[in-house]
Image: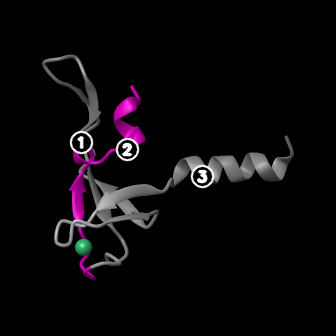
Amino acid sequence: MSNISRHYLQEKRKRMVLVFICPKTGHQFSSKDYSITENRGVVVDAQGNRTLDAKVVLDAPCPHCGEQHAYHVADLACPFSAKP
Ligand SMILES: [Zn+2]
């Protein structure tokens, strides 16, 4: 693996594309323009499932309705919840 592709993979891991659902129109869209806020770390629920207790706030307007939505990480079908 070259240095360039290794660097690319690190960048990709830092800010991956997530799939969001617009709460107004119900349409899906993907974006990597978001910030993670209110990160309280990984929590374990009664079933022993690990989830990240944080919010994801869009940095760019929704392509469907133009608003900047905010989501709880648990509401996203995203890789965060799979990580310890
Ligand atoms: Zn929207």
**Does residue 38 lie above or below 30 as drawn?**
above
The residue at the point 48 percent across, 57 percent down is 17
**Does residue 13 lie above or below 52 as drawn?**
below
User: Disc 1 or 3, which lies upstream in sequence?
Assistant: 3
Q: Name the mark nearer the viewer: 2 or 3.
A: 2
Q: Secondary structure at mark 3?
A: helix
Q: State the separation of the CA atoms marked 2 and 3.
A: 15 Å
**Does residue 40 lie above or below 22 as drawn?**
above
Counting from the top left corner in percent of width and height, residue 53 is at: 23, 40
Question: Label 1 sits on what residue type?
Answer: Ala
Q: Secondary structure at mark 2?
A: loop
Q: Which residue is mark 3?
A: 12
Asked if residue 12 lies left or right of residue 82, the reply is right
User: In this picture, which residue range is highlighted in magenta?
Assistant: 65-84
Among all residues in the image, which is located at the extreme left? 46
Question: Label 2 sits on what residue type?
Answer: Cys
Q: Which residue is mark 2?
A: 78
Nearer to us in this view, 9 or 26: 26
| Quadrant in the picture for the C terminus | top left
Counting from the top left corner in percent of width and height, residue 54 is at: 25, 46
Q: Which residue is mark 1?
A: 74
**Does residue 57 lie above or below 1 as drawn?**
below
Q: Is residue 80 magenta?
A: yes
CB atoms of marks 2 and 3 within 8 Å: no
Counting from the top left corner in percent of width and height, residue 59 is at: 36, 71
Among all residues in the image, which is located at the extreme right? 2
